[in-house]
Amino acid sequence: MRKQKGFSLIELLIVVAIILIIAAIAIPNLLRARIAANESSAASGIRTINTGEISFFTTYRTYGTLVALGPGATMTTACPVPPTVAAACVIDGVLSTNGGGAGKSGFNYAAAATASTYNATASAIVQNSSGVRAFCSVEDAVVRVQSPGPIAAGACANTVQPLQQ
């Protein structure tokens, strides 16, 4: 009688069980890493909006809306030459249009502006999945964070703590 070559059913089940245990340990860590990356991108986006607002104010003596800071109403709009108050091209089209309305890196961005103030916010699209914290800034250009998000409209300067790096 010859010996059959291959793996028994028990051996295969043990290997599958080991793989499932490793996956159960690794997947939550991967999700936390994705949330951390999304939040880092959101804080960076708020810093970019701050820089854009300062450049916009320096040029036009007023603060601009999110769309006015970018190249125009769509992500693919080319920058006008020379830039205008409606399309200043100080930030990229993806950020200025909030990813075409779908958000960017798991966060929704918004910026409201008047002649002397602005309020920029970044809130997770799906709380506890794409992000936990929310970020905001006003004309003092300090990035603030609130955990858990989102941040109420107009609450940034008064109630939200500065982001500690």
Image (cartoon, grey):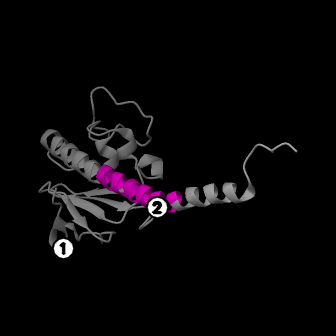
Query: What residue do we see at 40% from left, 47% from top?
Result: 97
Residue at disc 2, secondary structure: helix
On screen, residue 139 above or below 95? below
Query: What residue do we see at 70% from left, 60% from top?
Result: 10
Residue at disc 1, secondary structure: helix
* Residue linked to disc 1: 159
Q: Nearer the viewer, residue 159 or 21?
A: 21
- Residue range in magenta is 22-42
Q: Amino acid at mark 1?
A: Thr
* Residue linked to disc 2: 25
Q: Amino acid at mark 2?
A: Ile
Q: Whole-Å distance between the Cαs marked 1 and 2?
A: 37 Å
Residue 30 magenta-highlighted: yes
Please tell me in which quadrant of the rendered image residue 115 appears.
Answer: bottom left
Give the quarter of the figure containing the C terminus: bottom left
Residue 61 at x, y = what percent? 14, 45
Q: Nearer the viewer, residue 80 or 159?
A: 159
